[in-house]
Image (spheres, grey):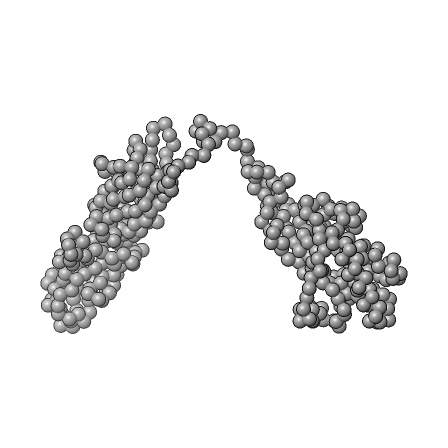
Amino acid sequence: MSNSLAIAAVTATLTHLLNDGIILDTPGTTVTAKPPEKARNTRNNQLNLFLYQTMPNAAWRNMDMTPQVKPGETGQPPLALNLFYLITAYGEDEDDIKSHRLLGKAMSILHDHPLLDANEIRDALPDNDLYQQIERVRITPQPMSLEEMSKLWMMFQTQYRISAAYQVAVVLIESTLSVKTPLPVLTRGTNDSGVSSQADLIPPFPTLEVIIPINQQPSARLGEELTIKGHHLSGDDVVIRLSNPSLPTAIELTTLPGRTAQELKILLPNNPAQLPVGFYSLVGVIKQTNQPDKTTNELLFSLAPSIVDFSPNPAVRNPSGNVTLTVNCSPEIRLDQRVSLLVGDREVSPQVRTNQSEALVFEINNIAVGEYFLRLRVDGIDSLLINRGVKPPVFDATQKVIIQ
């Protein structure tokens, strides 16, 4: 690869190449490398070389350099660039015939010289090392339509001159970041057994696949069992860790008796003050004697609130048609949680709370006489209104309030 002088080295090499070739055919011709609007400062024959664009080279963009980056090491890919040049011819005394002759000679030189020689690059610019890069630098004509050429010269803000475009690629500029070089591998696994293989697509490590609450409910509740299915779950001991953003540390639970390699069960603790309503991540830790612990993937489940009771029931409306209900729930509702009571199809917010508690007070305005099912919604998770333990499912009658 090359250093940051690579672009300048290409420009200098092209300038020397054109100058050495054109001087034999048209003595007195000067070759310059200036912006088009500043190039013409004499009335003699002149060729101007201008780098108008650089673009990343797609083939080398994310490729490590094999000689410098060995297998197992991680290195920064080189800055791989394609360079686009514009060659403009100026005839003596602005003679178009002479400018066409110059352009034709320049294109002939580049046509006969499609690869830049290492010695030419080395001699063109001191201290450059582009000539040492593994990829040869190639010169390719770049066809441009009249529209593209006219837009290019409009950008230059100068009068159009007969020109030809070329692509020079590829230039590899070495990254200055150091390569990460880990130590060589001495053994591959226990007893140098190498990579394990199997005849099926089931991963050979403990994996959780699904969490099933009791009675196929969409959410779990405190004090209920959770069935967890997966594979490779057998071990001397299995610990389940529950995590929630509201908990300072994860809670570890032991599995219930009767676990297998494909299924295990846990019992959620009935601790309303410790476990808030919300979404929990569940991870299994498989412990085996004389082996490191194995951790499974994470699965999510929701812990739903429960309406323990409410009063009064029946509830009698006041003269304004309003009713006040006190709802006792589990777990306790924290101050930073959003909570509402769904009365039929209406959503009611609680009265202002000052502490974490199980009791919530709701004032329901302008409610008609009738029977309504209640649901408690906390952070988007609803209490379970449907009893799926019977076929067909039915609404839980204990969650019904009578308004008189």
Taking the spot 22% from the left edge, 36% from the top edge, the residue there is 257
Above or below — where is 67 with respect to 308?
Answer: above
Above or below — where is 360 with respect to 242?
Answer: below
Tell me the quarter of the image containing the C terminus.
Answer: bottom left
Taking the spot 39% from the left edge, 37% from the top edge, the residue there is 198
On the picture, is 283 further left or further right than 162? Answer: left
Above or below — where is 258 with respect to 300?
Answer: above
What is the quadrant of residue 29 in the picture?
bottom right
Looking at the image, the residue that sits furthest to the right is 27
On the picture, is 30 further left or further right than 216? Answer: right
What is the quadrant of residue 295 in the picture?
top left
Taking the spot 62% from the left edge, 44% from the top edge, the residue there is 65
On the picture, is 33 further left or further right than 283? Answer: right
On the picture, is 396 further left or further right than 171? Answer: left
Q: Name the foreground residue: 37 vs 63.
A: 63
- What count of labels does the image hold? 0
Q: Position of residue 265 (x, y in %)?
A: 24, 41
Q: Is residue 262 visible?
A: yes
Tell me the quarter of the image containing the N terminus.
Answer: top right
Q: Position of residue 96 (x, y in %)?
A: 82, 71
Q: Position of residue 52 (x, y in %)?
A: 70, 62
Taking the spot 63% from the left edge, 54% from the top edge, the residue there is 57
Q: Is residue 308 visible?
A: no
Q: Name the foreground residue: 365 vs 175.
A: 175
What is the quadrant of residue 262 in the picture?
top left
